Amino acid sequence: MNCKLMRKFMALLLVFSMMFAMMPAMVWADSSADRSAKLVEEGLKDATNYWTSKQAADFASFDNEWYFFDLSRAGVSIDPAVVEKYVASVTETYAGRLTFKYTKPTTLARVTLALGAVGADPTKVGKINLVEMLYNNKDIGGDNTSNEAMWALIALDSKNYAIPAGAAWTRDKLIDATLEYQNADKGFVLFKGGKTDIDMTAMAIQALAPYYNKNAKVKKAVDGALEFLKSNLNKNCQFERKEQGGTSVISSETSSQVLIALVAMGMDPLDANNGFVKGDKNLLTGLDAFRVKGKGFKHVASVGVNAMATEQAMRGLESCRRLSAGEKSLYDLSDAGNQPGDDTSVDNAKKAKQIVSKMSLTTVATKTKKKTVTVKVNMTNKTAADLKSIQKLGYNVKYSFYSAAKQNGAYKVAATKKANSYIFAKGKKGARFYYKTQVRVYDKKGKLIAQTSLAKSKSASQAWGK
């Protein structure tokens, strides 16, 4: 073999060696994504089972805010009568009880988020304006806990509520108040001078995330907080933290709060480049270790399922689902119900959501003469009638089209259109792709108020011919 031929042979050998070296990693990445998507789907299903196994009417009162927030954000149908009873309970509560229990910022923030999620208006709770009570609250900063400032900011930003001139707390002041609770190790604390806490660090990031690219102080603080979280990640991608009394525990709630924080930053927790993956372990596998199949989530491994662990896991998993689907983040309620002052009524929004929550779509995929794939909603008489009812309420309907490489894989949205069909023009010859469709309902200002569950959408598949 001459030298010239030998050089060509060695070059080809090098190329093939590189290709084979890459193959296992590529296969692992695909299977990991499928496995992670399944953990989100199964976790949300089990968390939903926890709540739906109970009587909804038992939650129709003040102090059950996370029930309404969690189920609404996850697209789970709640009986409108139960929602109305809950809103009435909140109104009654604030008509006569303005003691610290009801006016503390974390309580006001929680109620504001719940009301916003179900389409009610926290600025009009009878004669009380909960948003005003937040931005004029005297129990933020100073010797108060850090979560008062953090959650006030999250609630005020949830629907971009206006803060008038002269208010006790502006957004900038709330940001500064939150930053005062960051320790030298870059983690955040509950009380000034206290020990750094992972949960509080995650919540601080959630509150500060919208300002990361706007405020240099916030960017520096959040970058440090993220490094602090990474440094406390164990080999199973879980976190050990100190509880009251000094006991060290590894809890599901901490994993949930960190998931919410990363997604609030627009960071994919499954992307190893973000620093929260160790081998085949990630934050989702860490959280899933606390799941009890069909029942919900545990606080720690040694105890049974409980409400707090399940509600926080539901929020963490819903955050991940929203990131994957390209939807609004968990606490961005601009896609939930009506903004104060919208010209469509809350009652109509509830009716539209109720119709959408009961819809189950079937997808049809056919090859065209050009060997592309047309995907459309199977428009049954019932589906057509439901959509017509929604439009009569004053809402606009659009259709989103998703594809995945595997039937139970991670579906990614390709387009959202007014038409109920869409042509997928790209594909690999011989490869089979799976498709799902989704109905999205918008108000007159273009805000998303409801959408069908992608999990309930029946998929269709086609093998590519070109």
Image: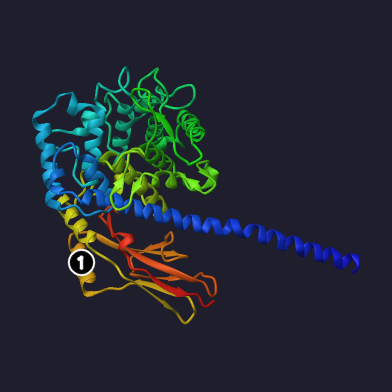
Residue 336 visible to an observer of this rendering: no
Q: Nearer the viewer, residue 284 or 69?
A: 284
Residue 335, how many percent across, how many down? 30, 50
Residue 269, how many percent across, how many down? 46, 45
Q: Nearer the viewer, residue 429 or 316?
A: 316
Rendered-image quadrant of the N terminus = bottom right
Q: Secondary structure at mark 1?
A: helix
* Display colour scheme: rainbow
Q: Nearer the viewer, residue 138 or 363?
A: 363
Residue furthest to the bottom in view is 369
State the image quarter where residue 190 is shown: top left
Query: Which residue shows up at 45% across the image and 64% down it?
Result: 404
Query: Which residue shows up at 9% across the image and 32% down it?
Result: 95
Q: Nearer the viewer, residue 47 or 108?
A: 47
Residue 460, how many percent across, how many down? 38, 72
State the image quarter where residue 263 is shown: top left
